[in-house]
Structures are given as C-alpha cells and as structure tokens.
Amino acid sequence: MTADEGAGRRSARAAHKVLNNNVVISVDESGRERVLMGRGIGFQLKPEDHLDPARIEKTFILEDGAEGDRARRLLTDVPYPIVEAVTAAVDEAERMLGRDLGRRILLAVIDHVQYVLERLQQGVRIPATSMPELRVLFPQEFGAAVLMASSISSRLGTDLPEEESVFLTMHLLNATRDEPNGTAALLFRRVQHVVSTVESGLGVALDTTSADYARFILHVQFLLQRLVARTMLRGSDSSFFEFAKRSYPRSFAIAEDVKAYVRAATGSELTDEEVLYVVVHVERLATQLAFEDPGDPVIP
C-alpha cells in the first residue's frame, strides 16, 4: 500500500457517491475527491454511511474536469474483475520497476484491456507488429509489460494476444519516462524508421533475435541521443571514412540514406564519424545475412 493509499484510508470519512458495488467516491479532509476501490465496498452503502477502511483495496485522488468525468464513467462501466486484474498487474509492475506509475496508467490500461476483451468476444483481433526494438531499447519496461499481460490473463482466465506486451510497454513508457513531449516514443519511432531504411537497403528482413541486431539497435539509440545532446562523435582522421566508402559501397549508401532521414527528421547533420559507425554496423548485419538461409523473406 502506498502512502497515498494510506492517507486515503485514514481520511475516508463517508461515502460521497457510490459508482457501483465496488467503487465509491469519497471526499477527504482536504475536500479532494478520492476514488476508493474494493470488492463490495459500495454494496447497500448510503451517502451518509461510513466506509470500512479494511475493505478498501486501492485509492487515488480524482482529477477535476473532463479527465475526472472520464474516470468516473470508466470505473462505473467496466466490470470490476477487469479493474481488479489490472490494478494487481500495475502493482506488480510498480514493484518490478521500483517506482510509482501513477493513476493515469491504471485508467489507461483498464480502458485498453476492456477494449481488447470486447474485440476478442466479437472475434476481432487488434493488429500489431511485434516491435522487437522495444525489447532491446526498453528491456525493463518490456519485461514488466510481459508480466502484466500474463498476470491479467491469469486473473481473468482469458489469454490476451501476445502483442499485448507491445501495447502495455508503450503504456509503461508513457508512465515512466520523464522526457517532455513524448521523447521516448519519438525516439522509438525514429529507431524504427532507421531499421526500416536499413532493411529496405539490404532487401531483407533483419533477424531481430541476433546479437548483431541488438548491437545495431542500441547504436542507433545512442546515435540519436547524442544528436539531441549535441555530442556527436567527431574525428580528425578521414582515412577510415574513405576506406569504408570505397570498400562497402552498399552499406555506405544505406548509411547515407540514414543520414538523409535524420536530416529530414531533426534538421541536424550526422558527422562523418557517426556515418562511419552506421556503415560498420550495417556491414556487420549484411555479413550475418550472407550466412543465412537464402530463403529468408525478401522485402518487396
């Protein structure tokens, strides 16, 4: 139980509004509305009745305005087993990541899981890619998302699609990353675009399970972060750059395409040193592909 939850239990005096048998809104001593959740806490509860603190399983402060209204509707309409399963999964993710994820991810995941279950009941599956870059770039969040998906599936007795780990990872990134303007998501999209550029240049789908692929993804991440921090690699010796240009023309051309994308996306120019390291990684991936089964899928 968090400090906020403890405060909620101590300050909960009387029911303000019963949303359903399991969710009640109470006004604390500071006049703030708190959502109180627990099995049966609202059953036959009158507005003037006092709540039993022992029955409260989760509490958080309700926001004002449209966001608060949306939370009320969501917690009123969604079956409580879903709320309970997601709450437990978020708690497990918080323990795994060692931080408080806040109320927004709880509501977002409740809404998402309800949507997924409705679509599954209708025989509709939400399309998604496996996004293997997530596993490399954000291993902690991805691991927590896998745990969340497994926990929710187990508690609800329903197997969520495997790609739910992708969606839940994105929810966790939104909750755990402090960069402004969705920097983590933007970085991820740019890494994906670079990967797509390399795959198009090589004419094949990369082996996302290989060590070379993981090293390449991390290099692209660090490259883009250096770009933002204006700490790009620079060297005074151009001989290696010229050697790579002559010796690995295909990899060099792909690196130039990456450079053009970065310029268009960020307005910044990669240094020759940065381009050189892209060439090295692309050539390593190309060498790996040369030893693979020629029947690997070709990108049209």
Image: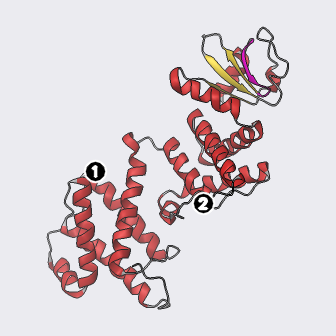
Using the image as rendered, state which of residue 11 and residue 148 is in the foreground.
148
Q: Visible in this render: residue 240?
A: yes
Q: How many marks?
A: 2
Residue 210 lies left or right of residue 38; in this view the side is: left
The residue furthest right is 44
- For badge 1, the amino acid type reads Ala
Residue 245 lies left or right of residue 28; in this view the side is: left
Up/down of 139 relative to 77, above or below: below
- Residue marked by disc 1: 229
**Residue 196 in the image, given as x and y percentages of width and height:** 38, 69
Quadrant hosting residue 37? top right
Residue 95 is covered by the magenta coloring: no
**Residue 49 in the image, given as x and y percentages of width and height:** 81, 11
Using the image as rendered, state which of residue 26 and residue 218 is in the foreground.
26
- Alpha carbon of mark 1 to alpha carbon of mark 2: how far? 33 Å
Q: Identify the residue at horizontal 68%, vertical 21% (top origin).
A: 8
- Residue marked by disc 2: 163
Numbered range of the magenta stretch:
14-22
Residue 67 lies left or right of residue 232; in this view the side is: right
Nearer to us of marks 1 and 2 is 2
Using the image as rendered, state which of residue 163 and residue 172 is in the foreground.
163
Quadrant hosting residue 260? bottom left
**Residue 88 in the image, given as x and y percentages of width and height:** 72, 42
Q: Which mark is residue 265?
A: none
Q: Identify the residue at horizontal 15%, vertical 74% (top origin).
A: 237
- Tell me the SS state at disc 2: loop
Up/down of 179 relative to 255, above or below: above
Q: Identify the residue at horizontal 19%, vertical 81% (top origin).
A: 245
- Tell me the SS state at disc 1: helix
